[in-house]
Image: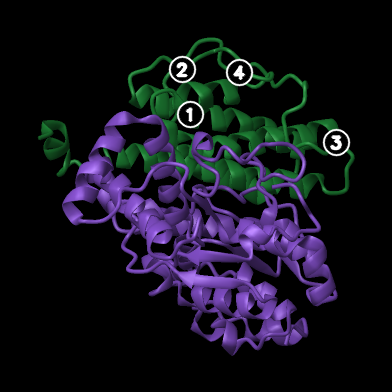
Chain colours: A green, B purple
């Protein structure tokens, strides 16, 4: 477990069909909630991974893409990130954040008795929160969200 | 770039490109970089008549002009300073100079634009390959090396727990950094470690820090300050949860963002964090026995006096 790369441990298959994910604000609130408690580290990281996928789905849907159901290195999260970075290399700024989330998922699941398991789950929540905030910001900057209804006509009108 | 014991003469005297930030908010980085150079006997010669690298503002409007501006810095280093190594401590400057180098080597259109603008401005056109751009981390790692630092610092940073924060631009995009990811000893674009290596050589204990290359929210500072504050707060919380006493930085923009939003987080969200923020050159300077004032630590927003006293760093 020295490498910070996802191990072959299969991540839980989540969405068999892609429905509209909950809002980014709701995701952020949920991450805050479970990060604050985290009594069950395994359940916590499973949900955080799922929330991370929801976050990336937002980015893809906002750009008119259908979120992939494939996996990369056994993680759908990593496949979604790769899909999200196609055509927008700046999205790679969150590549390592996604990999850290997968890594911390592995740490908790593979070492359920480790004395640091709660700390690891808490860090996973911070990583997931960062991903959520970063994507929220990217959507704003790309003018894809509804963050400011007053400016939307200007942005939509273009030059 | 693979020698951990050092002594690459090529890097012992370099052209120094501080960039705009180090003359302003990042002054502590500039002061400490120069102080460390003096202490280590390394030569820093300011690039003559340097200009802005094009940063984000120009790049967003006219990428060709940004390439030209960065190429002019390189041209001046080569033709006015007669140097073929340019050291840029700011991640933004470093990124832009590396990108200009890449574009001039691979994109005929960029080469044409730079040629025309250089001719119009009346200076020699920079040609790809005339100089190599390095970061301050490369500079110390190559010119002094870990063993050299170990001998000079004698474990002075022992007992100090450090979260090394590189930001998102130091290693991105990978294709403009051909010297990285070359195996043992080279810098990694996925898990950068040069700052970890240097500070460990000075005795520090590096904590495992999962957000070392995460976005600091710099791009949102004006458009959505709350978003920036939340991103920074998350980094600060993660550093504290990782057990760090201090976050070491190597970029003036990231550093200023962390400092400003640490204050703002307390005012705006009533979220207080106590982790300190210092440039890695300030930490290395302390390890070398240089006084805090000579390292510009008093010019930081983050007040590290208690930490310096508690850890007997000065």
1 and 2 marks on the same chain: yes
Between A47 and B156, the one nearer to me in the picture: B156
Sequence-earlier tag: 2 or 4:
4
Query: Of callouts 1 and 3, which one flags the residue occurring earlier in the amino acid sequence?
Result: 1
Give the quadrant of residue A30. Answer: top right
- Residue B121 visible in this rendered orientation of the protein: yes
Say which residue label 3 marks.
A112
Badge 3 marks a residue whose secondary structure is loop
Position of the C terminus of chain B, as image quadrant, is bottom right
The residues tagged by marks 2 and 4 sit, at their Cα atoms, a distance apart of 13 Å
Where is residue B21 drawn, in percent x and y? Answer: 40, 67
Q: Which sits in the foreground, B6 or B273?
A: B6
Spatial separation of the CA atoms under disc 3 and disc 2: 31 Å
User: Is residue B275 visible from the viewing direction of this image?
Assistant: no
- Element type at marker 4? loop
Q: Is the residue at mark 1 from the same chain as the one at mark 4?
A: yes
Residue under label 1, please give it.
Answer: A56
Identify residue for label 2: A67
The residue beneath circle 4 is A14
The answer to which quarter of the image holds residue B295 is bottom right
């Amino acid at each position: 477990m020295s490498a910070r790369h996802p191990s072959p441990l299969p991540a839980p298959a989540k969405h068999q069909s892609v429905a509209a994910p909950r809002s980014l604000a709701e995701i952020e609130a949920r991450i805050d909630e479970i990060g604050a408690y985290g009594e069950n580290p395994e359940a916590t990281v499973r949900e955080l991974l799922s929330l991370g996928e929801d976050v990336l789905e937002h980015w893809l849907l906002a750009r008119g893409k259908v979120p992939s159901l494939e996996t990369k290195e056994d993680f759908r999260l990593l496949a979604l990130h790769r899909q999200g970075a196609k055509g927008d290399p700046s999205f790679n700024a969150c590549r390592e954040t996604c990999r850290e989330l997968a890594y911390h998922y592995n740490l908790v699941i593979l070492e359920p008795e480790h004395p640091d398991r709660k700390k690891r789950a808490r860090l996973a929540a911070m990583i997931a929160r960062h991903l959520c905030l970063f994507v929220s910001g990217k959507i704003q900057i790309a003018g894809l969200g509804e963050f400011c209804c007053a400016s939307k006509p200007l942005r939509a009108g273009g030059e | 770039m693979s020698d951990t014991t050092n002594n690459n003469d090529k890097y012992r005297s370099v052209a120094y490109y501080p960039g705009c930030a180090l003359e302003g908010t990042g002054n502590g980085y500039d002061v400490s970089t120069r102080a460390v150079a003096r202490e280590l006997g390394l030569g820093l010669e300011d690039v003559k008549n340097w200009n802005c690298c094009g940063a984000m503002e120009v790049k967003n409007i006219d990428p060709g002009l940004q390439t030209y501006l960065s190429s002019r810095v390189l041209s001046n280093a080569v033709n006015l300073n007669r140097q073929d190594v340019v050291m840029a401590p700011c991640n933004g400057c470093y990124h832009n100079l590396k990108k200009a180098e890449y574009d001039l080597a691979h994109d005929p259109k960029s080469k044409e634009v730079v040629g025309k603008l250089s001719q119009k401005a009346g200076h020699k056109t920079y040609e790809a390959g005339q100089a190599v751009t390095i970061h301050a981390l490369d500079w110390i790692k190559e010119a002094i090396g870990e063993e050299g630092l170990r001998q000079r610092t004698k474990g002075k940073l022992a007992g100090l727990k450090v979260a090394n924060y590189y930001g998102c631009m130091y290693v991105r995009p990978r294709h403009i950094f051909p010297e990285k990811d070359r195996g043992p000893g080279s810098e990694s674009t996925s898990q950068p470690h040069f700052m970890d290596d240097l500070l460990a050589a000075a005795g520090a204990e590096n904590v495992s820090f999962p957000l070392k290359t995460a976005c600091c929210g710099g791009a949102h500072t004006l458009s959505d300050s709350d978003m920036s504050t939340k991103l920074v707060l998350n980094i600060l919380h993660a550093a504290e949860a990782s057990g760090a006493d201090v976050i070491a930085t190597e970029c003036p923009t990231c550093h200023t963002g962390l400092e400003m939003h640490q204050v703002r987080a307390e005012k705006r969200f009533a979220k207080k964090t106590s982790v300190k923020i210092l440039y890695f050159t300030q930490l290395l300077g302390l390890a070398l026995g240089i006084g805090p004032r000579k390292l510009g630590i008093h010019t930081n927003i983050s007040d590290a006096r208690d930490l310096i006293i508690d850890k007997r760093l000065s």
